[in-house]
Amino acid sequence: MRQVAIFRFSPTEGPAFFADWLDAHGIAWRLIPLDRGVIVPVDPREFAGIGMMGGPMSANDDLPWNAPLQSLLRAAVAAGVPVIGHCLGGQLFAKALGAPVTRAGVKEINLIAQDLTAYGRDRKDGSTLYGLLRQMSQVDDLQWIRLLYSYPNFLEPELLDLIAYLMSGGNPKDKAFAQVAAPDTLEDMLEFARTQLDIVAPASDLLNKNAYDILMDGVTDGFVVGKAVIEGVRCDHLAFRAPHVDWQIWVQEGTQPLPRRLVITTRDLPNAPQFAVTMTKWNLKPSFDVQTFKFTPPAGATKVEFLPR
């Protein structure tokens, strides 16, 4: 059986999760460490596919393996051999097929952490990645903000909405707002937002006065996973299965059984996406009046209409 060739350009940039994925699917692979002087193969038909990792160099650098590798890539495309490139590998593939690889000529900022979604948690001052991105998006002429890296389970909906908004060309400095009369109750308001405005709050079931009935509707199996600690609070971890979704909930121990985390896995969608929300600041005796819910547009803001569904 032919192997997948994985080209490595730097000893620190190994195949990592790419190799894990190949192993999990029973696909044989072979590492070709060009950083150790290994010669680039000539015939791409020796391989079931070609993968290329990253590296600190440029696709334009005059390195001994650069020209032979690009010849191999062109031959692979002609022979129908699959090719994938990550980071530097993508640049090399583009250059091999005739695309210019140049400096972008625009401002760019890279945010790097083991998990960027944890930004601000240790500061205990309300700082979030969402707030940081909103501030950065207002920097003049900043064209690119790269996020390296974020765990999908902890990406909040408002953060995803902001990223989608910025990617579509939106700018928080535009000062636009939309406003519509809402029903009187929380349950009716959430249903109105979902059905009329296409605004969905995935964890809104927890806010409904009939939360238990809604969550348990269609459930076929459930069990106690065990004990867990969520943001320093000891909880009971429960898991449930329904025809199309799995969901888990972590409930605080003791006399105040407050939900502390909810994870929903949608099994009937590709790759079984997950939504997760963690609740840390419960206030069981809130103080508010009608002014709390009064919206005052910022100076110079323009009112726009919601798009018809």
Image (spheres, helix red, strand yellow):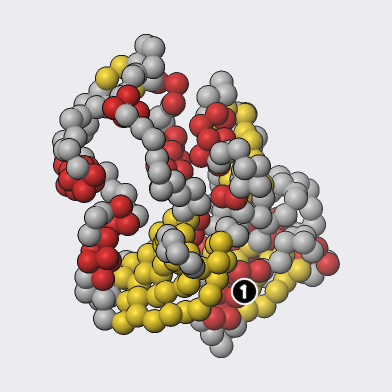
Spot occupied by residue 107 in the image (x, y as percentages of width and height): 62, 29
Location of the N terminus by quadrant is bottom right
**In the depicted structure, whether residue 76 falls above or below residue 241:** above
Residue projecting furthest to the top: 300
Label 1: how many Cα within 10 Å (few below 14, some 14–19, many 20+): some
Q: Dot 1 lies on which element?
A: helix
Of 255 and 273, which appears nearest the observer?
255
The residue that label 1 is drawn on is: 19
Based on the displayed image, in which of its 4 quarters is residue 99 positioned? top right
Provide residue 42's location: percent of width, then percent of height: 67, 70
Which residue is pictured at 32% across the width and 24% down the height? 291
Residue type of the residue flagged with mark 1:
Ala
Query: In the shown orientation, is residue 194 left or right of residue 145?
Result: left
Tell me: 109 left or right of 236.
Answer: right
Question: Measuring 66% from the left and 68% from the top, which residue is drawn there?
Answer: 15
Q: In the image, what residue occupies the spot 63% across and 62% down?
A: 52
Which residue reaches farthest bottom? 1
227 relative to 85, above or below = below
157 horizontally vs 134: left or right:
left
Residue 37 point in image, percent of width and height: 83, 66
| Image coords of residue 160 (percent x, y) | 43, 45
Q: Is residue 47 visible?
A: no
Q: Nearer the viewer, residue 20 or 63?
A: 20
Q: Quadrant of the C terminus?
A: top left
Which of 193/230 is in front? Answer: 230
In the displayed structure, does residue 1 sit left or right of residue 255?
right
Quadrant position of residue 303: top left
Q: Nearer the viewer, residue 24 or 202?
A: 202
